[in-house]
Image (cartoon, helix red, strand yellow):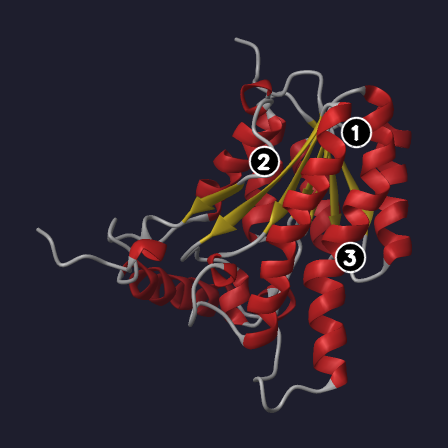
């Protein structure tokens, strides 16, 4: 049976952990060739060895425009085209409204918003020339509701949502769709201080923290379960596939209903 992404090529940033890793695995299973962009070279090499010839790893720091451009060029060099860019990489940010520093601001905006803006910037010309492409940006329910993320994190993710809409308006005429996904209570390494901090935990400690995290996150949704990286990967699959070709400028909220008011009291 053919895969939903047969013949397509994707670049997934933040691809060595959490949502990114789950999306890499799902896209490959659906027939896609995938470039994995991330900072963890050791994990990237292990993934390529495990996943096979249709996977490539590109060492990438998405807070640097030059790295984003190089990752996109490496994807096209390896596979001949670029059908989907999933700008997924991210991490926590520091500072409150009355305490932020310039360094806090630069880190959050470069990592969370700049990575999206320059991903669009360098993917768009390739996709316009092809006459089709799907750009997917990872936003957050923190862009939609208070107390779901830190101050700068929420501000940056709100920027991702609006950048998505504006880019989709500009690029839609060329057959390029631009959408974002707003995950809710998804159990990922961001809750452990980011993927780098999570990677430093021993396996037993990481498993224990993940079990506690999923139990706690389940309390925040009407579905009474934590979201998992696969839940976001399936949303990205839909937007990247031909089934999602008429969806543009859209924020797909995948949160188990939590933005409607959190867990209900209904039985």
In three-dimensional space, the C-alpha distance between marks 3 and 2, rounded to whole angstroms, equals 21 Å
Instruction: Describe the element under mark 2 as helix, strand or loop.
Output: helix
Instruction: Single out the residue that lies furthest toward the bottom.
Output: 99
Of badges 2 and 1, the one in the foreground is: 1
| Residue under label 1 | 82
Say which label, 2 or 1, has the lower sequence index.
2
Residue 135 showing in the rendered view: yes
Compared across the picture, whether 163 is left or right of 184 comes to right
Q: Which is nearer the N-term, disc 3 or disc 1?
A: 3
- Count of numbered circles on the image: 3
Instruction: Name the residue rendered at 64%, 54% in the picture.
Output: 160
Give SS at disc 3.
loop
Q: Please, is residue 15 above or below residue 8 in the view?
A: below
Q: What residue did someone put label 3 on?
A: 62
Q: CA distance from mark 2 to mark 1?
A: 18 Å
- Disc 1 is placed on an element classified as loop
User: 71 above or below 219?
Assistant: above
Instruction: Characterize the local packing of mark 2: few (<14), some (14-19) or many (20 or more) Cα atoms within 10 angstroms.
Output: some
- Find the distance from the CA under tag 3 to the CA under tag 1: 18 Å
Which residue is found at the position 88% from the left and 47% from the top? 69
Marks 3, 2: nearer the viewer:
3
Please give left or right for residue 258 compared with residue 206 in the image: left
| Coordinates of residue 204 in the picture (x, y in percent) | 44, 66
Q: Which residue is found at the position 72% from the left and 48% from the top?
A: 44
Residue 180, percent across and down?
A: 58, 44
Mark toward the start of the polypeptide (3 vs 2): 2
Query: Above or below — where is 222 with respect to 241?
Result: below
Point 53% across, 62% down: residue: 189
Residue for badge 2: 25
The numbered mark at residue 187 is none
């Amino acid at each position: 049976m053919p895969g939903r992404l047969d013949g397509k090529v994707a670049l997934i940033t933040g691809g060595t952990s959490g949502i990114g890793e789950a999306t890499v695995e799902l896209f490959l299973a659906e027939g896609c060739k995938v470039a994995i962009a991330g900072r963890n070279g050791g994990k990237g090499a292990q993934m390529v060895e495990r996943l096979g010839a249709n996977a490539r790893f590109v060492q990438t720091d998405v807070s640097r425009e030059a790295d984003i451009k190089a990752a996109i060029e490496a994807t096209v060099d390896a596979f001949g085209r670029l059908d989907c860019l999933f700008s997924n990489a991210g991490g926590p940010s520091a500072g409150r409204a009355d305490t932020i520093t310039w360094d806090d601001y630069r880190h959050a905006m470069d990592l969370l918003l700049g990575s999206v803006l320059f991903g669009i910037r360098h993917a768009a010309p390739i996709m316009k020339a092809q006459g089709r492409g799907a750009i997917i940006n990872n936003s957050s329910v923190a862009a939609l509701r208070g107390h779901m993320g830190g101050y700068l994190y929420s501000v940056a993710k709100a920027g991702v949502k609006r950048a998505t809409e504006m880019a989709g308006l500009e690029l839609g005429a060329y057959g390029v769709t631009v959408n974002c996904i707003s995950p809710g209570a998804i159990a990922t390494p961001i809750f452990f201080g980011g993927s780098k901090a999570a990677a430093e935990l021993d396996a037993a400690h990481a498993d224990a923290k993940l079990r506690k995290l999923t139990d706690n996150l389940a309390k925040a949704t009407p579905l009474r379960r934590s979201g998992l990286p696969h839940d976001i990967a399936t949303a990205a699959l839909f937007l990247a596939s031909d089934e999602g070709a008429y969806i543009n400028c859209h924020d797909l909220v995948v949160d188990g209903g939590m933005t409607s008011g959190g867990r209900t009291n209904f039985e």
